[in-house]
Amino acid sequence: MKISIIVPVYNAEKFVSQAVESALQFEEVYEVILVEDKSPDNALLVCQELAEKHSRVKLYQHPDKANHGAGASRNLGIQNATGDFIAFLDADDYYLPNRFDAEKELFKNEAVEGVYGAIGVHYYSEKAKEQYYRVFGDRLTTVYKKHEPKDVFPGQLNMRGTFGLFSIDALTIRKSALKKMEFFFKTHLKLHQDTEFLFRLSYYLNLYPGVLDKAVAIRGVHENNRITKVDSGEVKPATTRVVLWKEVNHWAEHEATLPKEIKVHIKRVYRSFEIANAPLLRKWGMITKYLFTDYRSIRSGLYNINFRKDLF
């Protein structure tokens, strides 16, 4: 195996060295691609030192040297990757020694286009633990049981009961399979680019379960994680979910091969979040409209705790 590890780097001078070292422990890792995204700290200097120290570490910036976000940085990494497989790692996270154990066996089968696993959590400080333990606890982020590839996409859409989650840090993709996708990461999304990408990826590619009962990578939690602020509620999650599901709904409407029942399900999830996040007068106007035109959008929304919480 020749694996390219793509690491978007922003404001991570304290953590990126650990991330890189955790990737270099594997002989299967052909290269570690750092994409520095105009960090306000000294991350660029740290990245330059890592590239000088390790022959497998390659450093890139966007052509205009400006900040473009994690999605655009991952896209740039994919474009420059020369390995046969691609894996991702956030600059404040790190891999565990079992990260590619399942992949080494599963990818012997040419039908396997991607493998996903479980991640754990590490708090970089007591302050971070005090702030975010109620969000992450000590739980694994994982899919709860092994599924056939055809069930991964509807499972992520919550159409197969309780499915669970997998993180991009625990995903490995056969590079050649990415030709099935018209777009990689949506650069206009400031948050949840990875979630939207995983939705589409699981529709187009055959994704197989790897190690699900123990962590293969670790999410690093500190006070400045952008996604941590969303997950904890410091940034209103309903707002970001509207943006995410609007994007998923837009893709679903234009994907001709997507079954009608899945298109309808996605639209209803999007509507439920849209209603929940609307101003009070508009909210009740939308509820009245959908009570007559699409009652199931309201009913499905009422099963959503964020919908109920934001309804009044």
Image (cartoon, rainbow, N blue to C red):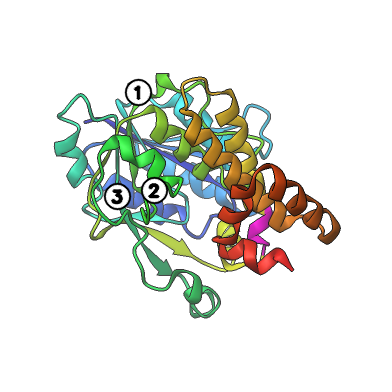
Quarter containing the C terminus: bottom right
Task: Judge left or right: residue 15 versus residue 268.
Answer: left
Which residue in the protein does label 3 denote? 117
For the residue labelled by badge 2, is the local secondary structure a helix, a strand or a loop? helix
Range drawn in magenta: 235-239
Q: Residues within 10 Å of mark 1 (few under 14, many from 20)?
A: some
Task: Judge left or right: residue 100 versus residue 186.
Answer: left
- Furthest-right residue in this view: 281
Q: Position of residue 141 (x, y in %)?
A: 37, 59
Can residue 36 be seen at all in this image of the molecule? no
Residue closer to the observer: 213 or 174:
213
Q: Is residue 237 magenta?
A: yes
Q: In the rendered structure, which amino acid carries the disc numbered 3? A: Gly
- First along the sequence among labels 3 and 2: 3
Residue at x-position 85% and y-position 58%: 281
Which residue in the protein does label 2 denote? 169
Q: Main secondary structure of the magenta part?
A: helix
Q: Residues within 10 Å of mark 2 (few under 14, many from 20)?
A: many
For the residue labelled by badge 3, is the local secondary structure a helix, a strand or a loop? loop
Q: Which mark is residue 177?
A: 1
